[in-house]
Structure formats: C-alpha cells, structure tokens
Image (tube, grey):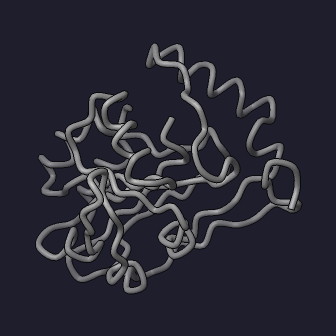
Amino acid sequence: MGIIGTAGERQHTHPPERADDLADMELPDQDGAEHRLGDYWKDAPAVLVWLRHYG
Amino acid sequence: MQLYRERGAFEKEGAQLVLIGQATPRHAAHFRRRQGIDLTVLADEKRRSYKAAGAKVATLNELVGPKVMAKGLISSMRSRQPQGRTIGHPAQLGGTMIIGRDGSVAWSHMSEDASDNATPEEIVAALRGI
C-alpha cells in the first residue's frame, strides 16, 4: 500500500461475466433507504456507474 | 456530471442509470444537491460493490500522474466545474457496467486510471448492441 492508500503495484480490473454477486447487495440511498441492486435490472437493462468519488 | 446529463439517451435505449458512490448517505445527499441531480444516488461506504464489480485501486501514477492530471484539467474546463473534495478512499477507481435482465454483464468499462471514464457515446453504442 502506497501513500494515501494507493496501490503499491499496478492492479488489473476484473469485471465479472455475471452480476450475481452484485444482485443481492443492498445499499442505502441518499435518504438512507435500502435498495437491492438486482431490482434495477429485473425488468430492463441497467447502466451502473461506480463513481470514483462524490466530487 | 456528464453521464447524468446524458441519461435521457440511456433511457431512450430502455436502460436506467444507477449511480453508486463510496461514502455515506449524507455524502450522497450533498453530492446530489451540489450537482443538481434528481436521480437516486446509492452509498457504498465499505466499497463492497466496487470489489464485486472488479474495480481497482490506483497506483500513485494512475491517480495523479501527468497524463491523468492533464485529462482531468481538460475535463474540468469542458464541464466548467472543478473537481470537488475527495470523499472516501482517494485511490479507489470506479467504472461503468451494463447489466442485462438475465443478470449477465453485457458490457463494462472499469477505469484503468483516474482519468479513464466511459463516454455517454460508448455506453449508448453498447446498449444498442445488446
């Protein structure tokens, strides 16, 4: 681990082929209400964006 | 934020945009107000979904190297919005993923460095291909 939490060595991204592990995760929204991720693509495709930061 | 502004193009292709950040609900609420976003913003303080999505943690060069800083400056100038204060793990990178109704990951673009982001055009083209 480097300074400010940086990786000491270059990492590789490894997106999964299926979102099964993501589907059952529940995350709170801005009001604290829990959302099950899999519900977002239950009826239609979803574009999920993981923000680097709330900047 | 550019992807939010272009969300209509994703909806036209039948997909909804979901934003996930790596902080608390309070931070997510502040982010929505600051950016003028009326979309739900999810908060993943422990970064569990980042790990499950295969996002990586940047090296110092991937975070603040010359190429990254130059692209970030150009991006800020284009959007006319300076980058805000970093909340959460400073070296955690993000990414974009299109997930189909069957749970398959139809397309993904996980960031290789802090300046590497999928464009709305790339996302729309990917949606048209699934």
User: Which residue is more in the foreground, B6 or B40?
Assistant: B40
Is residue B85 shown above or below B124? above
**Image location of residue B104, percent across then percent down:** 33, 79
Total count of labels:
0
Quarter the C terminus of chain B occupies:
bottom left
Question: Residue A23 vs residue B43: left or right?
Answer: left
Q: Is residue A27 above or below residue B126?
A: below
Image: B126 above or below B61? below
Q: Is residue B102 left or right of residue A50?
A: left
**Image location of residue B85, percent across then percent down:** 58, 32
* Left or right, A12 with reference to B9: right
Pick the front one: B57 or B43: B43
The residue sitting at 13% across, 56% down in the picture is B14
Identify the image quadrant of the N terminus of chain B. top left
Q: Residue at x 42, y 84 (%)?
A: A21
Q: Is residue B29 visible?
A: yes
Residue A46 at x, y = what percent?
25, 62
Q: Is residue A41 left or right of residue A4?
A: left
Residue B125 showing in the rendered view: no
Question: In percent of the image, x 55 and y 26: which residue is there?
Answer: B83
**At 53% from the left edge and 44% from the top edge, which residue is drawn?**
A53
**Residue A55 point in image, percent of width and height:** 51, 35
